[in-house]
Image (cartoon, helix red, strand yellow):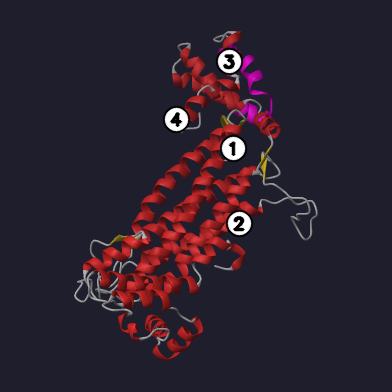
Amino acid sequence: MIERYSRPEMAAIWTEENKFNAWLEVEILACEAWSELGHIPVADVKLLRENASFDMERIYAIEEETRHDVVAFTRAVSETLGEEKKWVHYGLTSTDVVDTALSSLLRQANNILRKDLRTFVDVIGEKAKEHKHTVMMGRTHGVHAEPTTFGLKLALWYEEMKRNLDRFERAADGVQFGKLSGAVGTYANIDPFVEQYVCEKLGLSPAPVSTQTLQRDRHADYMATLALIATSIEKFAVEVRSLQKTETREVEEFFAKGQKGSSAMPHKRNPIGSENMTGMARVIRGYMMTAYENVPLWHERDISHSSAERVILPDATIALNYMLHRFTNIVKNLTVFPENMKTNMEKTFGLIFSQRVLLTLINKGMVREEAYDLVQPKAMESWETKVPFRQLVENDPAIADKLTEEELEECFDYTFHLKNVDTIFERVGLA
């Protein structure tokens, strides 16, 4: 991932040096396991642990000749050792090291993403409670529907992100597996204890069955989950963008002193952070498709997945880390304009109360079709003439004669629509 969208803690996991460190740890832990079995002398393992190292330039130089990165790595490490070097890579195949180390790196990345997700959920929850009773217009098909609150909109985000957190935990568990089972997964030249030992030390689980590789359905599921989380963030960001339109201006991204919105138009205050979320989500969804195409490997292994994963796994985790951090700050610092929300509610001349008039007429004994056919023409007339809907209702004896003044007043009381807000907040755990 380019530096612009990389945060230091996550980016550090995916450096070449850290990758080689992870490979080296797998190699040394495997030797420790062999020592536990009595196959490698304890003294040799001690020397390996103390002295094994690598020079990255040397690895790259050897790879120029071998055209095999793991062979280049093991030879570069061996050059830093004495006679104990014979135990490096003992009984292992390349993917025993690469896949298990990759799972270890993903585990580190998951720890960061988990923290990010929990912080994001908490921030949304606090903002939802802050605006629990901030009344605004609910819109369906982009058109005024009925009153809601901004807090309810945020409570919806909160609940969705809780589901995403659950999905993430499951998907993260799915990629936190290791395998040291040899060339085709039969443990022909390695004891299953070695796999168990290495995985336990790395905080991984041994794959119950493998070929030369871990199966890539695990990684496809993981990438799909990251893509879904990114898409949820995009969904929320699109809402911010829509509500920040000049004609609406119910919310606005924080605009810092000295910030510029346009090189040409000094007045501009654009929702660039939320727009950025849409772009980043597109990238991660694209990587999801690549992960799915990595699943059908040939027989017990090919490396068609390898080149793709060198890009998509670091990039997707780095990108989602960036998205979560940036959009958390957008939500935390979001400017909300309650007065604009109320003003916008009044732009449709009371039409948002049409269902209340309809249902009240039904409650008074009118057949639904008859009531609907009375109310709709008044609503359409209000749309066309901009005459307040209530005025048209009051002036029509076919409607007004069936309703008392108190009933009519209740029809046009927006608080009626919000009487269950507390109940909804209790359901989602925000009481």
Q: Please report the bounds of the magenta region as a residue range.
A: 380-400
Label 3: which residue?
Answer: 410
Image position, residue 175 (x, y; %): 36, 60
Q: Is residue 134 above or below residue 69?
A: above
The residues bearing labels 3 and 4 have C-alpha atoms spaced at a distance of 27 Å
Which-is-in-front pick, marks 1 and 2? 1
Residue linked to disc 1: 127
| Sequence-first disc among 1 and 3 | 1
Assess disc 4: are there few (<14), some (14-19) or many (≥20) residues with their C-alpha within 10 Å of its C-alpha. few
Residue 274 placement (x, y as % from top left): 61, 51
Which of disc 2 and disc 3 is earlier in sequence? Answer: 2
Instruction: Tell me which amino acid carries mark 1.
Output: Lys
Q: Secondary structure at mark 3?
A: helix
Task: Please check the rendered image and state whether residue 383 is part of the magenta-colored stretch, yes or no.
Answer: yes
The residue under the point 75% across, 52% down is 268
Depth check, mark 3 against mark 4: the one in front is: 4
| Distance between the alpha carbons at the discs numbered 1 and 2 | 21 Å
Q: Earlier in the sequence, mark 3 or mark 4?
A: 3
The answer to whether residue 425 is left or right of residue 86 is: right
Which residue carries the number 2 mark? 276
